[in-house]
Image (spheres, rainbow, N blue to C red):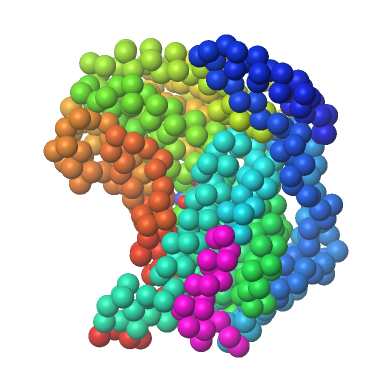
Amino acid sequence: MGKDEPARGSGGEQIRRREADLAEPGVRWDYAPARESREIVRLRERYDLFVGGRWLEPKTERTFTTIDPATEEPLAEVAEAGEEDVDLAVRAAAEAWEARWRDLPGRERAKYLYRIARALQERSREFAVLETLNNGKPIKESRDVDVPLAAAHFFYYAGWADKLEYAFPGRRPRPLGVAAQITPWNFPLLMCAWKLAPALATGNTAVLKPASTTPLTALLLAEVIQEADLPPGVVNVITGPGGRTGGWLAAHPAVAKVAFTGSTEIGKVLRRSLAGSGKRLTLELGGKAANIIFEDAPIDQAIEGIVNGIFFNQGEVCCAGSRLFVQESVAELVIAKLKARLSTLRVGDPLDKNTDIGAINNRAQLAKIQELVRSGIEEGAEIYQPECELPERGFWFRPTLFTNVAMSHRIAREEIFGPVLSILTFRTPEEAVEKANNTEYGLSAGIWTEKGSRILWMAERMKAGVVWANTFNRFDPSSPFGGYKESGFGREGGRHGLEPYLDLDGGAA
Ligand code: NAP
């Protein structure tokens, strides 16, 4: 498929198909107008650094190419920030903090947050298409989840900006200064909102570095921030390779707080390098969540929850329900239903509104998924993949189930970060808890049962930051999110999400 060709016929053909579908009761097709969707995005050929309220060419004079993972077509050239650029950005943030932002009343900061939230809503279609183009996720997810949730975070934290003393009674909450914020590629815009909204609401300024494979929605957000007239330097967005740009940013002496979301491996690197620096650090890292289904669960509802739990965003979700524990008595039934449901999932063009599973974000991630799936087969697990045609170009992986999985298998222990579900069984609630907690991670878990008392009993015992009951992957800005063990520390979201950006000790009553 060429870069500018529509994914499914011309606009006229789509309308004719829609008309034909309407004539056929019971069939509901809603073809995405791929060509029009693309056109809503006005890509620049080259994106500079957003520093001090202006777009600056990098001192390095270097750029890198960002692509569409569904086609491997280049989308734009993006600036590579060097050490001098990082320094400029941090200094711009520090000056903005000293000169204005730290003393601005909360209700004034809130106004800017509301403006950003509304601009996200007004330009939601553009953000959704750009997110899908750069990340590979289905348009229905970027449209219905990523963008509205990002706006919701700005709305939610705008509400806290002038009520911080009520959030921490008896204490005197004060901002820290410059926050360095480093985000991953799986929810590029949403992660910016998770980081920026609480930082700005609490009176901090920020330098944000998005992941190199998905910088475009962070840069569009910078455009929105410029239009919202935020004082220059309050938000700066710089791009470049993690090991260099990200490393310099985190280590900069004028940075008071580092907020990182990404892999456990890099989280550990940062933790080591910042030890003794006096900087505050929060880490949102990997996961290997358990979805636990009891024999009394509402099975059909649970099947949908399990499918959503692992195939939402191609499974590239830190809290993905990648291990399914099924009570032995219903294992056969659940596996049969899951296989049937898998064969109805539509894999392909992420801009098509009917697509359930889009492209894997990058080649390295695809190789990692392939390697772990191979290990599953070699270690003796049984693989199931439905028949489906995959596009020739781009990074694709079929939805995959593994049965006959042992707790010692790599696919039961390591984060795959792809559309791969490992199914294990249990007999008693005690065994389910023991197995589910037998992981180095502790980010989330799901419990499916009709028994309220069992939900409470299980939730008390699960070592996971979030425990969902009879649902999965439910997010709300008012709920704190974060991990135990190798999944990191600190919470984002809710009142808890304010705390990492505040000095509360000075004013302790
Ligand atoms: P990653 O490789 O750790 O990268 C995350 C971010 O850190 C990127 O912006 C990256 O820049 C940057 N980075 C890389 N090396 C760095 C270094 N030495 N110093 C400072 N920054 C550095 O993770 P990813 O592959 O983007 O994301 C996938 C991982 O994120 C998964 O493990 C997933 O579970 C985790 N995740 C966790 C949560 C959560 O809330 N717990 C949410 C989403 C994702 P480059 O892109 O330039 O390398």
- Which residue is rendered at x = 42% and y = 81% of the image? 174
Percent coordinates x, y for residue 493 in the rendering: 41, 58
Nearer the observer, 443 or 165: 165
Which quarter of the figure is the C terminus placed in? bottom left
Nearer the observer, 138 or 91: 138
Q: How many marks?
A: 0
Residue 43 visible? The answer is: yes
- Does the magenta portion include 107? yes
Which quarter of the figure is the N terminus placed in? top right
Does residue 223 lie above or below 263 as drawn?
A: below
- Which residue is rendered at x = 53% and y = 13% of the image? 25
Q: Residue furthest left?
A: 453
Percent coordinates x, y for residue 301 in the rendering: 33, 26
Percent coordinates x, y for residue 359 in the rendering: 64, 32
Q: Is residue 163 left or right of residue 250?
A: left
Nearer the observer, 444 or 405: 444
Specify start and end residues of the magenta stretch as a single range.
99-118
Q: Quadrant of residue 249?
A: bottom right
- Which residue is rendered at x = 41% and y = 18% of the image? 338
Q: Main secondary structure of the magenta part?
A: helix
Residue 489 visible? The answer is: no
Does residue 240 lie above or below 313 as drawn?
A: below
- Does the magenta portion include 221? no
